[in-house]
Image (tube, helix red, strand yellow):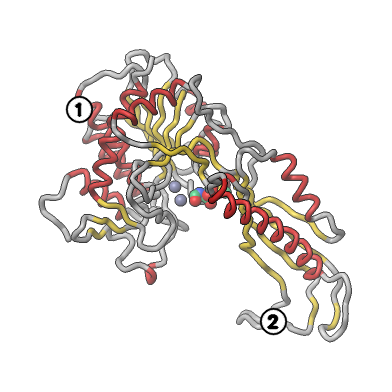
Amino acid sequence: MNNIQENENVTVFREFLKIRTDHPTPDYECSTKFLVEKAKEYNIPYEVYRETGTPIVLMKIEGLEPNLKTVLLNSHVDVVPAVHDSWKVDPFSAWKDENGDIYARGTQDMKCVCMQFLEVARRIVKSGQKLKRTLHLSFVPDEEIGGIGKGMEKFVYTEKFREMNIGLCLDEGLASPTNDFTVFYGERAPWWVHITAVGNAGHGSRFIEGTAIEKLMRTINKMLAFRQEQFESLHHGQHECGKKLGDVTSLNLTVLKAGIPVDNSNNFSYNVIPTQAEAGFDIRIPPTVNLDEFLNQIKEWTAEEGLSFKFASYIPKNEMTKLDSDNKWWENFKESCKKLDVNLVTEIFPAATDSRFIRNLGIPAFGFSPINNTPILLHDHNEFLNEKVYLKGIEIFMGIIPNLANME
Ligand SMILES: CSCC[C@H](NC=O)C(=O)O
Ligand SMILES: [Zn+2]
Ligand SMILES: [Zn+2]
């Protein structure tokens, strides 16, 4: 339904959703052009930073005391691919139904927050009010592809980033299916482990010993036993002590590779025992787990002769943001939410966001998407967000961000 009297903020959001920033070929030139045009239209000072290889759009509202630590509103502009056939509508048409539910890839993750931050910046500039601290906005690429990308991971090590003198970063959170809102103060470390096994070859009719697959299977079984333990502690915890996904280590076998191909049409040499077999795991480790010890655990799992592993994603440390009364940013954030009647639930983010690079520099970061009463649909088919929830989110951010920037 395309209502002519649609709220202008909703229209801008829907325009942004239509930009094809989906992997594997995100159109960052198009998203950059869009953001630059908006910055010009809204009189927000901006620049396009290209030193890391892909454009990062930066906006800045200078504070009255520019030497104070600043507030960064960070959002990623890329989105994960969408399997068109599994959606009820084109995932890049930003279709809106009669209830105001907008369907598109990125409605929750996280083009909503991109456009909400932009609108907040616009309103602040337009009002002429001066904030104490400088407010920075960064619209970054490649969050969804992690370490191989050219986004925040590289940006945090630039002179530009250092000059921004950030004291607090706001980044994405998750939708909440209840009336409460979730805020994230840490996240699980994403470790992607690729295991390679080599072993003896021979005719498929014989009892060959020490084969690659046999060795790999032993390791896989040990790792899946650990997975089961963790699953049970989560399951059990939900009744006993309220454990959430972010509190346990998850481990999933996501890559499996072996067999000698005979041609390019998926035919294999079933009677040849392959000398090599590979397995890949997606492992997510809570910040409360000692990462050195967990690395030793992986070494132990892969200790057998003929096995080796390498990381496709690895982070050696995983800092959390402390939510205590010493953290003035947190006190300020909490106070604003209280005034807004926004009931907060604090959690560890189960997946990974750009916040991990910020927190690992010792800078506090809160993961917060102002979305409640909405199912969690990030990366899922038919991802949607209701326009009223979206608009309410702008008001919520307006009740939070200026207070942070005005903090003593
Ligand atoms: C290893 S970086 C991957 C980042 C990605 N972020 C969002 O989904 C994730 O899988 O959590
Ligand atoms: Zn995201
Ligand atoms: Zn994502």
User: Against 23, is 183 above or below?
Assistant: above
- The residue that appears at 63% across and 41% down in the rendered structure is 315
Circle number at residue 126: 1
* Relative vertical location of residue 347 with respect to residue 89 in this rendering, above or below: above
Compared with 268, 88 (above or below) is: above
The residue at label 1 has a CB less than 8 Å from ligand 2: no
Residue in view at x 50 percent, y 35 percent = 185
- Of 22 and 287, the residue lying toward us: 287
In this picture, residue 157 sits left or right of residue 4:
right
Of all residues, the one furthest to the bottom in this rendering is 205
What residue lies at 44% left-to-right and 31% top-to-bottom?
Answer: 169
Can you give x and y, in whole percent of width and height, for residue 27 in the image? 39, 52
Q: Looking at the image, can residue 124 be seen? A: yes
Q: Residue 109: image x %, image y %?
A: 40, 49
Q: Quadrant of residue 59?
A: top left
Residue hosting label 2:
268
Q: Quadrant of the N terminus?
A: bottom left
Image location of residue 368, percent across then percent down: 40, 39
Q: Position of residue 123 (x, y in %)?
A: 23, 30
Alpha-carbon span between mark 1 and mark 2: 66 Å
